[in-house]
Amino acid sequence: MYMYLRPGLKEFLTETSKHFELVLFNNGSQLYTEAVVQRLMKTLKQQLKLKNDITFFSHILCREQCSTNDKGHEIKNLEFFTGPGSNRDLKDCIIVDNSIFCF
């Protein structure tokens, strides 16, 4: 099965991963998220004609790391990668998402 990628995704991930730490946070289950990321990496490896495996993301978070807000919406809990145990500050993070209700 082949995965179709948005135009520019290869270039975006390749260039941004050179300069930033990339964390993928998906609302899907861990099993689903891992399957999609595995397929994505396989497709990118083929398209970039690489011999070695590639990894763009330092962390992959999923539904199990989400919380529920007071309105019952599932939200991404940013404490998982900016909390007291990490070396990251939220003010240094850029969040790209398709929903304003996720955080």
Image (spheres, helix red, strand yellow):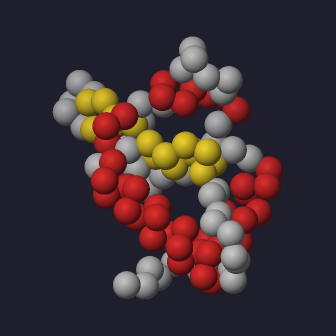
In the image as oriented, which residue stretches furthest toward the right? 19
Relative side of 33 to 47, left or right: left
Residue 50, picture quadrant: bottom right
Residue ID at (25%, 37%): 73
Question: Where residue 13 appears, x then y in whole percent?
Answer: 66, 63
Relative side of 95 to 76, left or right: right
Q: Quadrant of the C terminus?
A: top left
Image height check: is 31 above or below 90? below
Please indicate, yes or no, whether residue 101 appears anywhere in the rendered image.
no
Please indicate, yes or no, whether residue 5 appears anywhere in the rendered image.
yes
Closer-to-camera residue (49/81): 49
Residue 93, picture quadrant: top right
In the image as oriented, which residue stretches furthest toward the left? 72
Q: Quadrant of the N terminus?
A: bottom left
Closer-to-camera residue (36/13): 36
Closer-to-camera residue (89/59): 59
Residue ID at (62%, 28%): 90
In the image as oriented, which residue stretches furthest toward the top? 84
Question: Where residue 14 appears, x then y in whole percent?
Answer: 72, 65
Counting every numbered tag in the picture gives 0
Question: Where residue 37 appears, x then y in whole percent?
Answer: 46, 61
Image height check: is 71 above or below 16? above
Residue ID at (64%, 57%): 56
Image height check: is 91 above or below 3? above
